[in-house]
Image (cartoon, rainbow, N blue to C red):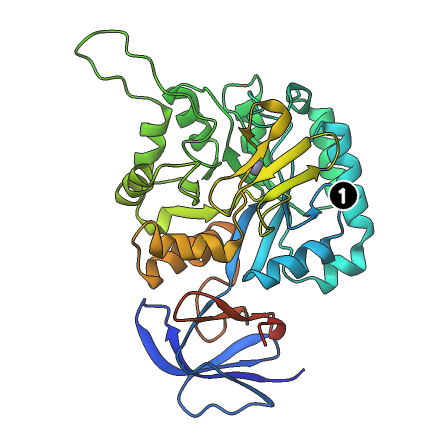
Amino acid sequence: MTSISVRNGLVLLADGRIDQCDVLIESGVISEIGAGLMADREIDATNCYVLPGLIDLHVHGIGTASASISSLAEIAKLEASYGATTFYPTLFAPPEEIVSQLRRHIDETDELRSTPQVAGFRLESPYIANAGGGLPRYCAPISEKATRTLLDAGSGHIRIWDISPELPGALPETARLTELGIVVSIAHTSASIEQANAAVECGARLVTHLFDTFHQPQQTEPGAYPAGLVDYLLVEDRVVCEIIGDGTHVHPLLVEKAFRCKTADKLAFVTDSNVGAGLPSGRYELPLGWGTAEVKGPNNGVRLVDRGMELCGSALTPIDEFRNLISMFGKDIATASTVCSKTPARLMGLNKGELASGRDGDVIVLDMNINLVCTIAAGEVIWQAW
Ligand SMILES: [Zn+2]
């Protein structure tokens, strides 16, 4: 395997400092960070940031590719061109369709092996109480049989499973899946604070796009300000909360509130991207009967034309979101990198998310305007701008 040295860039170190130096990657792993590191292949990163690759926990589609109908290789190629070195294809469909989508992906086993960016699958449905942008038929009661069928179809590759804590059977199911090493995410829910707390006690460690698909508590007594589920999740240190960082799904004021309550170590910015992300403004056909979607730039969401322009995921690409963290939400490079790489990596137990010797060789190079210059995954250059 060719060794790569990313030379002379502004390297974000694991302690948050930025230092002008080289990053050497050998056999797919970062072997050294320092000065004068030579390699078979050298990438000049002068006047560029060198950062860990972006990790997206929540991806339905990008460009014209969809996790429901496209090949993993096709999605991965597009993700690479937007800076993602790891992502979780996210399925949102009726249970029987999820089973066939998983089987189709598992049949691409060679592709799975040769696509190191795919860290596993995520099931957003069927165990959710309200479908959000989806249809009611995508939801199903929690049953041992359905779980077994889905787990079998996923062949050990399901890594994140969304569950609404108020559903009958949600708590034992959360405990069972947690035991299997699957990260359970509190999702699409009107649960009470007590129900959500019980799910956390059973092992739930992630919250699916906080604020979106969560209800607000009603004020029942004048003069008494009601506390709701979102308030609980903001102060529950055991859970990482996802934020869709386009400014439309979550108002910048609430993004700032989330940063102050959770800190960057407990926030994971996700795109929740759908077909249309990264494409010019226009109308696009979504697969499997979702209908026509409208996209107007990266920050206005993917909207369903036939359903009153309802939001159906975002039009963000990973690099759009990273840029928003700096330009829209006023964060520095280190903080943006934490919520886009380090926190998701720590949550998922990946040997990624920071630049340090021994970590996987997943690196992105950005120019000073936060445009992507180069993407390296598992020690191979998988995309470059020139
Ligand atoms: Zn989603």
- Left or right: where 236 falls relative to 292: left
Q: From the top left corner, tell me how far across and down residue 227 is, in percent.
A: 28, 21
Q: Quadrant of the C terminus?
A: bottom right
Q: Which residue is mark 1?
A: 69
Observer-nearest of 284 and 163? 284
Observer-nearest of 7 and 103? 7
Location of residue 103 (image quadrant): top right
What residue is shown at x 39% (from left), y 75% (from top)? 11
Does the closest atom of ligand 1 sit within 8 Å of the Cβ of label 1? no
Residue 35's place in the image compared with 377, above or below, is: below
Residue 195 visible, this orientation: yes
Q: From the top left corner, tell me how far across and down residue 196 is, in percent.
A: 42, 25
Residue 198's place in the image compared with 386, above or below, is: above
- Mark 1 is surrounded, within 10 Å at the Cα level, by few (under 14), some (14 to 19) or many (20 or more) other residues, namely few
Observer-nearest of 4 and 233? 4
Location of residue 146 (image quadrant): top right
